[in-house]
Amino acid sequence: MSRKVSYGLAISEEVLGEGAPVLLQGGVEKAMIRASELGFDSAELHIREPGQFDVQKLLDISNQKNIRIAAVGTGLEYGLNGLNITSPDKSLREKMSARLKEHIDFAANFNAVVFLGLLRGKAPSYAARKEYLDRLAQEFIPIAAYAAERGVILGLEPIVFYLTNLLNTTEETLEFLERPGLETIQLLLDTHHMFIEDKDMFESFRMCKGKIAHLHISDSNRQYPGGGNVDYTKVGDVLKEIGYDRAVSLEVVPYPSGEQAAVYGIEWMRSIWGA
Ligand code: LER
Ligand code: MN
């Protein structure tokens, strides 16, 4: 394989349903095998409980099937487990931090990036955003140090307004990461959020050159690339222009089916970076 980017997709242990942007659901071991058969060479695991997995088994599948675990998604800690890291409730924050460290330890086995996404929670009002962002930074400082000590890269994701009111645009997320103690955290960019939130998503990619830990491909309507309004020829061009060389990962709804969306997605990737 001469290309540097890996072709990836989101998989989960639980069956999350058609509203979740995860293509192969209901068991990560079998999903890794199937993804490899479909031509993918990386996967991101959306998991709610890192301790439940047999790490050696996952490493074996990874080696045998030539599919690496590129990232560990932590959003289900929020969506299924009800945890978040900006809650005024200190015990909830402590629980979330402890779980995040478990995700980091788990990810260290695979040299995988850990998402900092939905686990940020939400502020109860726009007026409360500053207080919540300050708390987010405070909580992330020790987490960033913990990850750096273990050589694990964290990717903070700008997320669209309908899911959170904390860090929606790429620009404000980059600025947030300039706070002392957060410099080692990189970005996880997602074309769905960028298309909706950023004035010019292509400029956003340029702004983040060299700082993108992981990439989510998801169209304006959360479908496979080409299912909505994002110009994916231009996305490919800008990614090549900035020299992005990590995982390009489909985080899309399983429409018209998980497998079909995966096929459409990998066809787009091949049109940009080749086989
Ligand atoms: C939010 O839907 C998203 O894009 C996920 O990557 C957040 O963890
Ligand atoms: Mn995403």
Image (spheres, rainbow, N blue to C red):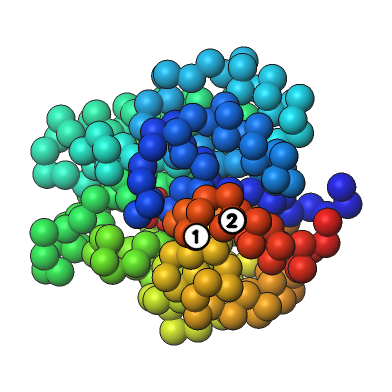
Q: Residue at x 58, y 50 (%)?
A: 259
Left or right of 209, for residue 137: left
Q: Which percent across, then down, holds residue 109?
A: 60, 24
Q: Quadrant of residue 125?
A: bottom left
Q: Ligand 1 closer than 8 Å to the CB at disc 1?
A: no
**Badge 1 amino acid:** Pro
Q: Ligand 2 closer than 8 Å to the CB at disc 2?
A: no
Q: Quadrant of residue 134?
A: bottom left
Whether residue 50 is visible, yes or no, is yes
The answer to whether mark 2 and mark 1 are in CB contact below 8 A is yes
Whether residue 149 is visible, yes or no, is no
View extreme (bottom): residue? 199
Q: Which mark is residue 266?
A: none
**Badge 2 amino acid:** Gln
Q: Residue at x 41, y 47 (%)?
A: 116
> Crowdedness of circle 1 by 10 Å Cα count: few (<14), some, many (20+)?
few
Q: Residue at x 65, y 56 (%)?
A: 263
Quadrant of the image containing the C terminus? bottom right
View extreme (right): residue? 2
* Viewer-nearest residue: 268 or 122: 268
Q: Which mark is residue 260?
A: 2
Give the structural element (helix, strand or loop) at label 2: helix
Mark 1 — residue? Answer: 256
Q: Relative to 164, say whether 135 is above or below.
A: above
Q: Residue at x 64, y 62 (%)?
A: 264
Q: Which percent across, then down, holds residue 163?
A: 27, 60
